[in-house]
Structure formats: structure tokens, C-alpha cells
Image (cartoon, grey):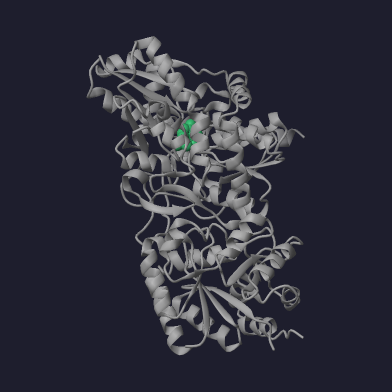
């Protein structure tokens, strides 16, 4: 069986139509989860590749949250069973209306939302009724904090491979083992994904030893830019966990 | 309402504003900082160390200066300025830099990250880092790096690494984002943030370190005029000099507090930096406040002749005080700020920073509506030397170009001589 890949893209980059096409390519090549990012003018925790993609999606393509939901609706209609997670910075969905956004996602069969600049236990997060947020943790998460998060019953944890922004060179921080062990013990049914900097099958193999899902973002955007998206998808998804 | 106590006890929320909206990876560093700051706030030993440093390094108290000629010419209120430009490194910024650097030392930090717009916060940070033996990296938008060149040189001379950020509009907002990204990659570094913005504890912490400005104004104004000011006027970029000036007067309802935003060169989006006047509530760069943004929640570009005011967000404390009606907001244009620099130079022998000049520009208008029995104090948050190449281009472009030509010629002559 292939090791599960969560494949990320920025909606509206290089255009809405092309991001839809990429998403379909991701699905066709067997990506287990799609992570669809709503573009934001100033993505504060992303590296240059995603930042540039966001900027073009916002400035040139004028991508609105409504457009992203339409794209999601199209995908949902064509692929009723596909697991999809949404990703956004807080301000865009805050402006759209958190409750309205949550309701729209649920009606389109999306339960998971990743918001890198919204601590999962902040009062504002409670307005996302019915949505399961995905905590994005790094190797420095404190014992107490981690215990508290585990008590909140999340079913997917997104771990940063190391202290870096998206699209940096891959490395796995040794202290992540501690975080993973705590999650496995406290929330045995939850899935763990590792991302940030993954671009090769070898790196997927490393991640597979520790986690349930490898998350790939910048590398796919770059592959798409260079016109070899399908080969890249094949080599990454095709890796078999033996 | 006891505004002051509320701010000091806030735990990061000012009405609905403030908070700590950051990636989880930064929470340990911010919690450590919050706890460190809570402990320092009431620690007499720290407070005496802090005030001693303000005195020994900055020469505090800074001067409180009447503006007799301009006051007479306007024929309205009596104008006074608080000369924060007399601080070491030339602006109020060093007050919170000393405070934060002392905290960083207590937390055992070795490396400091900072952002800067006008270069004043970066310059002050570089100076305190050199003094306290801390490694220092300063992020500065490429546009600001070019227009505030003198400060880049001072920072480098002080041993700091200055990174020109080429992202986005290449101004303060982009520098803040670059600094946050550095912090994500190096979460054991200390981010020495330069205004009363950002996640908790920065807004309250920088206000706490800056409140000495208003405390001095209170006693200086009382001893000079026998009363409190009718109005205090400060420019507002992120809000550190304004909060420093206003804090001590927040519970004196009879003292009007007026923040002046950058009116830039127009009222269309992208032409100014008036966030409390024209922005909308949002969540960005770690805090909930007013931001200049479009209808979809994307952050707008800003424009101002003064790099230090050229920023999309504003202190959540000022957002709360604006909603409460305690602080009023006005705007001054690029042109009015430049005119104020020239007027102060000619009529009072003072050269304010372009940021501070916005406060003067509005205060001159305000004074005209008042009487000589009224007292208006302006926060001269910084001095104007850093603006050499901006103001000279406006006032003496020919001389600037002639000087540039002279330098180039001199260099090529030297080259031939070798
Ligand atoms: C002299 C001076 N005044 C004002 C400002 C604006 O910042 P704040 O609103 O935090 O005082 C700056 C920022 O660089 C500055 O250098």
C-alpha cells in the first residue's frame, strides 16, 4: 500500500481553473488527503514559494473566499469520497465570517481546518462550530500544553518537521519523537502528519517511520511551475511502505 | 473607568482587541516572555535597574520645551514639546529597547531579532545589544533600507546584521513578517519588537516601558505651567510613542489625547496609513486590532513619507481606547509633515523626525482653535537627522544632487590617482 500523502496547493494559483486541474491530478495520482489553502496577501508562516503563489492568487487572480468554496464544491461533486482539509490564515476567514465559513465547509463535507496563526484553544476558534481544527505543533511544544491539546480530542496533528518555514530544506528534529510518543499514548486513534520541506521519496520514507501522513506543499507548487507535476506526484505517492 | 489599571492587568486583551494569534511554535517563547514580564513589572530591583539605565544611557528625563515663537505666531494655545529626540540614538524607541533587552538578559537569551521601519527601533536595538553583549539581526524593508540609509549605517557600525527585505511592498509590514519567520526558525532567540503592536505581551509591555514619557510630561508641565495639558498630541505608527505619552493621562478625563495618523498623499487605499480612521478590525501579525485591508481580508499596502508610520496595523490598546472615545484620531498629510519640519527648523531651531512632524502638523491646526490659556503638548518622538536624504530631496534637491556628483567625481579621481 502507498504511504498516505497530504498534498497541498494554493487555490487560485496560477489560476482557479489550473488549481482545480492540479487538485484533480493530485487525486488521480492517489494523494490520500488534499490540503487546499485559501490565498492570503501576507502569509506570515510560509516560505517564498507559497508566499509568491499566494500573492499571485490574490493580486493577479483576485481570488475570493467565495471562489475557493466554489472550487471546493466542484471537487466535492466530482469526488464525493475524497478527504479534503482546508487551510487559511485567520484574517481571511474572520472577514468572511467564521460561523458562515464553518457551515460552508461542513456542507461540502470538509471537517478539518488548518489555521496556522490561530491557537486551537483561542476563544475565536470556538466560533468555527462543528469544525475540527488541526493543531500545527513543533518539537518545542511544552509537556503541559501538549497534554491540554490531547485532552481537547483532536483527531489529526500536523507536526512541523523542524524549526523552519514551509519549503525549507528537510530535516527531522530529534525532539519530535517525544511529541509523537505523547500523542500516540494520549490519542491512539489520532493521525499524525509531518510536513515542512518534504520534496523527495527518501524524505517520505523517513517520515513514514514516525507518522501516518507525509505532507507536501512547496515541492508540488515548484513541480507544477516547472511542468513536471505528474512525475513528482508519481515518485512521492508511489513510494510503498513495506 | 480605570484605563491604566486595566492595561496593566489585561493579560493581553483590551476589550475585544489584542490576544496572541501566533503559530503554536512561538507560544513557548511568548509564554516565557509573558511570565518574565509579569515578574519584572513589580520587581523593585528590575525597576531601579531600568530607570538607572534610562538615566545613564538615555540621559532621561528628556527636555520639555516651550515653543514661544510658533505659539505667538499662531495666536492660539501655548505649545510645548516633549523632546524624545534627545534620547540616545535619537528617538523614544530606546526606552522599550532597554526594557526588553534587560528582560532578554534575565531570560538568558543570546540572540535578538528586530524589525525596523524608520530605522530608529533597529538603531536603538543595535545599540542596546552592543552594550549588553547580545547578537543582533534587524529586518528592514528594502524601500526603508534605501530611504533611511543613515540608520542602516549606524546599525552596522554597532555590529548588527541588517537584512533588507525584498518581499511585498518592502516596508515595515514586510520587515515584521520576516522577523516573525526568523523567530519561527529560531524560537530560542528573543524578538525585540518595536511598537505597542504584536501578540501579548508586547502591547502592554512596550506601553509599560514607554510610560515614563507621560510621567515626565506630567511633572514637567505642572512645574512649568502649574497645570495639566488640555491636549497631548502624538503621531501613531504602531503606537509606542503615543502610548508612552498618553498612558499616564488616561484616567485624567480633562486631558484630551490625540493620535495623528499618516495621511500620506491621498485617501484612496494604498495612499496613506490611517488605520484607525480608515481601517477595519482584523487579526494579523499576532493581534486583533484595526488594519488597512480590503473587503476580502487581504492586507493593503500603505504609503507615508515617514517610514515609521508606513504600516498597516495599530496597537490593540489604541483600538480599544478609540472605541471607548478616550483617544481621538486625526490625520496629517506628507506635505503637512514636511512643512512642519521646515517651520520648526526655522522658527524654533528644532528638527523633528518626519514621524513626529505629523503630530506637529495637526497640533498647529488644533492650537489655532484654542486660546493662550490652553496648553498643548506634542510628543517629538524623534529627531530628524535620519531623514537627511528625504528632507534634503524635498527642500534642496539641487544641493543633494550636486553633493552626490561631487562624491562620485571624487571617487573617480581617487581611482585615477592609484
Ligand atoms: C521617531 C519615530 N516616531 C514614531 C514612530 C512610529 O512608531 P510608534 O507609533 O510605535 O511610536 C517611529 C517608528 O519608527 C519613529 O522612529
Mark yes or no: residue B338 visible.
no
- Residue B199 in the figure: left or right of residue B292: right
Viewer-proximal residue among B75 and B298: B298
Q: Is residue A25 above or below residue B8?
A: below
| Number of disc labels | 0
Q: Position of residue A96 (x, y in %)?
A: 37, 64
Q: Is residue B10 above or below residue A49?
A: above
- Residue B88 in the figure: left or right of residue B257: right
Q: In this view, does B172 lie above or below A133?
A: above
Q: What residue appears at the point 72 percent right and 37 percent down from the top-left corner?
A: B415
Mark yes or no: residue A232 visible.
yes
Q: What residue appears at the point 41 percent right and 37 percent down from the top-left corner?
A: B236
Residue B321, picture quadrant: top left
Where, quadrant-wise, is the C terminus of chain B in this rendering? top right
Where, quadrant-wise, is the N terminus of chain B in this rendering? top left
Viewer-proximal residue among B274 and B17: B17
Residue B44, picture quadrant: top right
Q: What residue appears at the point 52 percent right and 46 percent down from the top-left corner?
A: B143
Q: Position of residue A80 (x, y in %)?
A: 47, 88
Amino acid at each position: 500500500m502507498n504511504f498516505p500523502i497530504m498534498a497541498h496547493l494554493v487555490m487560485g494559483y496560477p489560476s482557479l481553473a489550473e488549481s482545480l486541474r492540479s487538485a484533480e491530478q493530485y487525486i488521480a495520482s492517489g494523494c490520500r488527503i488534499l490540503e487546499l489553502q485559501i490565498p492570503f496577501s501576507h502569509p506570515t508562516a510560509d516560505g517564498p514559494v507559497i508566499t509568491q503563489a499566494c500573492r499571485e492568487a490574490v493580486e493577479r487572480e483576485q481570488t475570493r473566499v467565495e471562489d475557493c468554496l466554489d472550487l471546493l464544491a466542484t471537487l466535492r461533486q466530482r469526488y464525493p469520497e475524497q478527504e479534503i482539509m482546508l487551510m487559511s490564515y485567520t484574517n481571511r476567514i474572520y472577514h468572511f465570517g467564521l460561523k458562515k465559513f464553518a457551515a460552508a465547509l461542513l456542507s461540502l463535507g470538509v471537517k478539518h481546518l488548518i489555521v496556522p496563526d490561530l491557537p486551537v484553544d483561542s476563544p475565536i476558534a470556538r466560533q468555527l462550530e462543528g469544525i475540527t481544527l488541526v493543531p500545527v505543533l513543533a518539537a518545542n511544544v511544552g509537556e503541559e500544553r501538549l497534554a491540554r491539546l490531547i485532552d481537547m480530542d483532536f483527531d489529526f496533528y500536523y507536526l512541523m518537521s523542524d524549526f523552519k518555514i514551509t519549503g525549507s530544506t528537510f530535516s527531522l528534529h530529534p525532539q519530535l519523537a517525544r511529541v509523537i510518543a505523547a500523542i500516540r499514548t494520549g490519542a491512539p486513534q489520532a493521525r499524525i502528519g509531518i510536513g515542512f520541506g518534504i520534496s523527495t521519496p527518501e524524505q517520505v520514507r523517513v517520515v513514514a517511520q514516525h507518522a501516518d501522513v507525509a505532507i507536501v506543499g512547496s515541492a508540488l507548487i515548484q513541480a507544477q511551475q516547472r511542468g513536471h507535476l505528474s512525475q513528482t506526484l508519481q515518485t512521492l505517492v508511489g513510494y510503498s511502505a513495506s | 473607568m480605570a484605563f491604566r489599571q486595566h492595561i496593566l492587568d489585561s493579560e493581553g486583551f483590551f476589550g475585544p482587541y489584542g490576544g496572541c494569534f501566533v503559530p503554536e511554535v512561538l507560544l513557548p517563547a511568548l509564554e516565557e516572555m509573558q511570565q518574565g514580564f509579569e515578574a519584572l513589572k513589580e520587581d523593585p530591583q528590575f525597576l531601579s535597574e531600568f530607570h538607572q539605565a534610562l538615566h545613564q544611557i538615555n540621559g532621561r528625563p528628556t527636555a520639555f520645551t516651550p515653543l514661544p515663537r510658533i505659539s505667538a505666531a499662531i495666536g492660539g494655545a501655548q505649545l510645548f514639546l516633549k523632546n524624545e529626540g534627545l534620547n540616545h540614538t535619537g528617538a523614544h524607541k530606546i526606552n522599550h529597547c532597554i526594557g526588553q533587552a534587560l528582560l532578554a538578559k534575565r531570560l538568558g537569551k543570546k540572540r535578538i531579532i528586530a524589525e525596523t521601519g524608520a530605522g530608529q527601533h533597529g538603531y536603538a536595538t543595535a545599540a542596546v545589544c552592543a552594550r549588553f553583549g547580545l547578537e543582533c539581526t534587524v529586518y528592514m524593508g528594502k524601500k526603508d533600507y534605501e530611504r533611511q540609509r543613515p540608520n542602516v549605517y549606524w546599525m552596522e557600525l554597532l555590529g548588527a546584521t541588517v537584512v533588507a527585505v525584498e518581499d511585498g511592498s518592502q516596508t515595515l509590514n514586510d520587515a515584521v513578517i520576516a522577523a516573525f519567520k526568523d523567530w519561527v526558525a529560531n524560537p530560542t532567540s528573543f524578538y525585540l519588537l518595536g511598537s505597542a503592536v504584536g501578540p501579548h505581551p508586547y502591547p502592554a509591555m512596550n506601553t509599560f516601558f514607554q510610560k515614563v514619557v507621560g510621567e515626565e510630561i506630567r511633572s514637567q508641565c505642572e512645574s512649568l505651567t502649574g497645570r495639566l495639558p488640555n491636549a497631548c498630541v502624538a503621531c501613531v505608527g504602531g503606537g509606542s510613542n503615543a502610548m508612552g505619552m498618553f498612558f499616564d493621562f488616561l484616567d485624567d478625563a480633562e486631558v484630551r489625547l490625540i493620535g495623528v495618523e499618516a495621511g500620506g498623499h491621498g485617501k484612496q487605499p494604498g495612499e496613506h496609513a490611517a488605520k484607525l480612521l480608515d481601517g477595519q478590525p482584523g487579526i494579523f501579525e499576532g493581534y486583533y486590532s484595526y488594519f488597512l485591508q480590503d473587503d476580502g481580508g487581504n492586507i493593503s499596502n500603505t504609503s507615508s513619507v515617514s517610514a515609521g508610520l508606513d504600516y498597516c496595523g495599530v496597537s490593540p490598546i489604541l483600538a480599544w481606547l478609540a472605541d471607548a472615545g478616550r483617544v481621538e484620531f486625526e490625520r496629517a498629510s506628507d506635505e503637512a509633515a514636511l512643512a512642519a519640519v521646515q517651520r520648526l527648523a526655522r522658527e524654533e531651531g528644532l528638527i523633528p523626525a518626519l514621524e513626529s512632524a505629523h503630530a506637529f502638523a495637526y497640533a498647529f491646526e488644533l492650537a489655532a482653535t484654542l486660546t493662550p490659556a490652553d496648553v498643548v503638548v506634542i510628543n517629538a518622538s524623534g529627531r530628524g537627522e535620519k531623514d537627511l536624504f528625504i528632507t534634503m530631496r524635498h527642500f534642496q534637491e539641487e544641493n543633494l544632487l550636486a553633493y552626490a556628483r561631487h562624491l562620485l567625481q571624487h571617487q573617480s579621481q581617487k581611482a585615477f590617482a592609484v
